Image: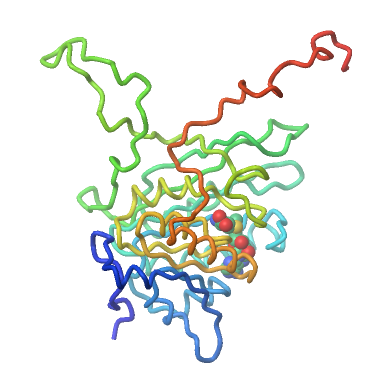
Amino acid sequence: MSMINQSFAYDAQGDTSDAEQEKQEAHILKPNRKVKPTDILSLNHAIWLGDAEAFLKGLPREPIFDLIVTSPPYNIGKEYETRTALDIYMEWQERIINELIPRLKKGGSLCWQVGNFVNDNQIFPLDIEFAPIFKQHKLQLRNRIIWQFGHGLHTSKRFSGRYEVVLWYTKTETKKDNYTFNLDSVRVPAKYPGKKHFKGPNIGMLSGNPLGKNPEDVWGIPNVKSNHIEKTEHPCQFPVGLIERLILSLSNPGDLVFDPFSGVASAGVAAALHKRRFIGCEIKADYAKTGMKRIQDALDGKALYRPHDKPLYDHTQSNLSKLPPEFETGEAQ
Ligand SMILES: C[S@@+](CC[C@H](N)C(=O)[O-])C[C@H]1O[C@@H](n2cnc3c(N)ncnc32)[C@H](O)[C@@H]1O
């Protein structure tokens, strides 16, 4: 029997009955002799506490996921990874991707969010390294989204890095193949909503979309630093707003979202907020536990998060933005 034909608490509209609503619970599954990867497929919101590659190998090799969205370890020596040579890291990631693609549904999307590998002050943008792997799998690239943010290390031998990239691919082959793209659900306020057509049959009429404009492919969303409302113990969590925009536009209510490197489950929070099902995989127990709690908070309507369309804070309003007198007189130099 196919393991993916199980019944879930969500229907196609993402609605749940009252009784099912009560059952909306986040789970952690820890592998052992009795608990197998396939057991997770009957749950709506769950994290597998273990290695992503082993987990994927334990699932049937058939389309399961509607959307795969992740930010893998970047091999930069964070506390959750052992830094290796770039080619060894890429071989590992390729093995994971080889397991992922057969399990992505036709018309589904894959979003790979990466920054730079840095060696000897030389940068290796990881999206460039990953692109040939996805090309080999014949996925179609829809956008290379620039996620731009305001805070990070100040470098002295090159310009400080302030963006990362999301590669958005669809599992489609030709232009006739359908894929989910709910643009209206992620529109943002237009710059000039009062703008009118100045010629043609609609002259004098408003030219914009009343729902707002396409958010375009450069997204300014604050990264999660110490005073961010979403900050947990994880050193590199991505903002819920970033995933929220991807989940809303690239999946439908009731769809199954998978994150093979789920950390503290920011993707799981966005999925729960918008009635998508979620499976994550995380090797560190503390992160998995925090992730489960965050998903449960989202299911209970208690999630702390910054929505994708919240305007950026205007830093010029802060007292800290005022030029100190010492700088003006040159005394501080
Ligand atoms: C960049 S972080 C992801 C953060 C996540 N997007 C969030 O918002 O919390 C990568 C995560 O992958 C986890 N990880 C590393 N190796 C893994 C493996 N072999 N299997 C599963 N997870 C792994 C790390 O512990 C880390 O939490």
The image position of residue 14, as x and y in percent, is 28, 60
Number of disc labels: 0
What residue sits 55% from the left and 30% below the top? 313
Relative to 209, does residue 109 appear above or below in the rendering? below
Q: Quadrant of the image for the C terminus?
A: top right
Return the residue nearer the eye: 30 or 85: 30
Q: Quadrant of residue 228?
A: top right
Left/right of residue 319 with respect to residue 51 in the rendered view: right
What residue sits 43% from the left and 49% below the top? 244
Of all residues, the one furthest to the top in this rendering is 329
Q: Is residue 176 visible?
A: yes
Return the residue nearer the eye: 312 or 149: 312
Left/right of residue 76 with respect to residue 134 in the rendered view: right
Return the residue nearer the eye: 150 or 100: 150
Q: Quadrant of the image for the N terminus?
A: bottom left
Return the residue nearer the eye: 314 or 279: 314
Q: Is residue 72 visible?
A: no
What residue sits 47% from the left and 60% below the top? 268
Of all residues, the one furthest to the left in this rendering is 201
Left/right of residue 97 with respect to residue 208 in the rendered view: right
Q: Quadrant of residue 45?
A: bottom left
Q: Quadrant of ligand 1?
A: bottom right
The image position of residue 70, as x and y in percent, is 50, 57
